[in-house]
Image: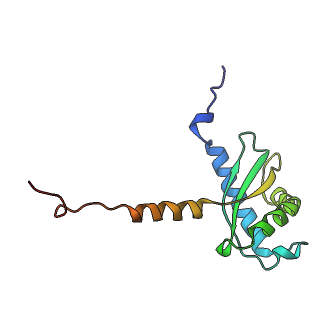
Amino acid sequence: MKRQNNNSKGPSQRQLRVGEQLRHIIAEVLARGHFHNETLLDAHITVAEVRVTPDLKLAKAYVMSLGGQDMDVILPALNDEAVHVQKEINRQSNLKFTPKVRFVRDDSFDEAQRIDELLRGVHIPDSDDTDEA
């Protein structure tokens, strides 16, 4: 029996479950702060989401620093420390393969703020505002 291509349906339950497991592990590693890079020692970083490829070999972690500050310095530092994070994932998870982790900026907060500003600018006329002829 041939499997159907389900790329248009979004991530599978397994991808979602593994992504959430990885998010917890990565957040724990970041909270402990045992890094070689001094940039990350005092950084407060939030892991919003982790998306995993269908084969579970690549993971993209969406992160944001507190207030969105210094992300141009923090992202390269995180990606340099990705091997350390992957070792911790290997130790704490029961996955057959440890996914290669890549850290990217989480723009969902900025996007939500932009949408909120657009919605605040929309004027919905009241029934009293309409002209009655």
Image quarter (top left, top right, bottom left or bottom right) of the C terminus: bottom left
Res 62 → quadrant: bottom right
Residue 91, percent across and down?
84, 59
Q: Of 64 and 57, which appears nearest the observer?
A: 64
Residue 51, percent across and down?
68, 50
> With 81 as the anchor, is 15 left or right in this view?
left
Q: For the point 87% across and 76% down, which residue is it?
A: 38
Residue lying furthest left in this view?
Answer: 133
Q: Of 67 and 85, which appears nearest the observer?
A: 67
> With 3 as the anchor, is 104 left or right in this view?
right
Q: Of 110 and 77, which appears nearest the observer?
A: 110
> With 75 as the anchor, is 84 left or right in this view?
right
Image quarter (top left, top right, bottom left or bottom right) of the N terminus: top right
Residue 73, percent across and down?
81, 69
Residue lying furthest top in this view?
Answer: 1
Query: How many labels, in total?
Result: 0
Q: Is residue 84 above or below residue 16?
A: below
Q: Is residue 52 above or below residue 55?
A: below
Q: For the point 59% across and 41% down, which residue is it?
A: 10
Q: How is the image coloured?
A: rainbow
> With 113 as the anchor, is 60 left or right in this view?
right
Residue 102, percent across and down?
79, 54
Res 105 → quadrant: bottom right
Residue lying furthest right in this view?
Answer: 36
Q: For the point 84% across and 56% down, which residue is it?
A: 90
Q: Of 29 and 44, which appears nearest the observer?
A: 44
Q: For the point 79% across and 64% down, which residue is it?
A: 75
